[in-house]
Amino acid sequence: MKPNAARAASDRRAGFRAGLLAWGLLALAALAAPARAGDRALIDFIGFSADARYFAFEEFGIQDGSGFAYSSVYILDLKSDSWVLGSPIAVQADSETESLARIRAKAMAQAAGFIDDFGLDGPVEIAALIGDGVPEADGKHLRFGLPGYGPGVVSGDYRLVLRTFEADTTKACADIFGSPSRGYELTVFQGEAGRLVHRDTSLPRSRGCPLDYRLYGVVMPFDNATLSHAVAILSIYRGGFEGPDRRFLAVPLGL
């Protein structure tokens, strides 16, 4: 074999070996990647009413097990700390081919009458947020103030403290998921003075089998920022088909 031909053959063999190595590394990376288990809903804040009594948000995602898209619109009466009649407005796909964008559009179309009736067009201000990608955040403590104007201008200094505990439920959650259901207690502090915002005495059926809770954020009406109109957003992790399913709770801080 001539030198040039031998060199070309050697280059082809080297290229083949490099290709095999690359495919092997990709396969190992795929095996090391975390498997999708459960579903993690996202949240979109819709708005407050002009008098800050009503608040609406959308919860949406891809359901575990079925892979179907879903969207639920919640309208909360902050004065009574309850959903308004007819809420939530829930829409779920019938197959994996129906996109999340289409399901979300359907849910918002069905909720449009409620949004108009309650005047839920007041913009939402995010006072504080614990993003899902924040490392080492315990989700049980959140410090916040009332947004002001100018860089770093904040009025007030508050802390939310979230505590969870075992709670009774009508479902056999411990038998199904290997862990008892949990309730939560939320307290807001200003300095050393604390005020209990909420403590579960029983768990509503709508929560399913709660395994844990985390603080997600604090929102309030834009240009109407007072603690009496603030709402704490909690992530609730409940037992699901493939793993924990994340949903959301809105808790009025002004009660």
Image (tube, rainbow, N blue to C red):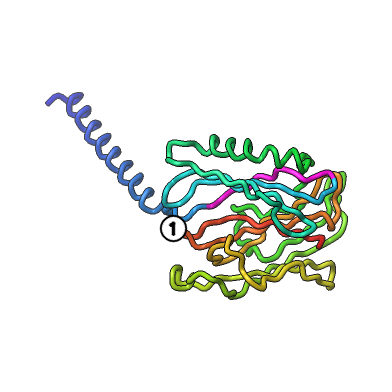
Question: Which quadrant: the C terminus?
Answer: bottom right
Q: How many marks?
A: 1
Question: Which quadrant: the N terminus?
Answer: top left
Residue 163 location (% of width, % of height): 66, 71
Kindly identify which residue carries mark 1: 241
Q: Nearer the viewer, residue 137 or 244?
A: 244
Q: Work out which residue is located at the far front of the displayed protein and give it.
A: 85
Please say whether residue 43 is one of the residues in the magenta stretch: yes
Please say whether residue 219 is one of the residues in the magenta stretch: no
The residue positioned 61% from the left and 68% from the top of the image is 203
The answer to whether residue 27 is left or right of residue 39 is left
Give the vertical position of 132 relative to 209 (above or below).
Answer: above
Amino acid type, mark 1 = Phe
Q: Residues within 10 Å of mark 1 (few under 14, many from 20)?
A: some
The residue positioned 66% from the left and 41% from the top of the image is 111
Can the viewer see residue 123 in this picture? no
Q: Nearer the viewer, residue 9 or 201?
A: 201
The answer to whether residue 28 is left or right of residue 98 is left
The residue positioned 38% from the left and 49% from the top of the image is 29
Span colored in magenta: 40-50
- Dominant SS of magenta comes to strand
Quarter of the image holding residue 228? bottom right
The residue positioned 70% from the left and 38% from the top of the image is 113
Give the vertical position of 142 relative to 172 (above or below).
Answer: above
**Helix, strand or loop status at disc 1:** loop
Q: Work out which residue is located at the far left of the displayed protein and give it.
A: 1
Can the viewer see residue 24 in this picture? yes
Residue 212 location (% of width, % of height): 58, 66
Q: Nearer the viewer, residue 24 or 157?
A: 157
The answer to whether residue 47 is left or right of residue 63 is right
Residue 171 location (% of width, % of height): 51, 69
Residue 19 location (% of width, % of height): 29, 38
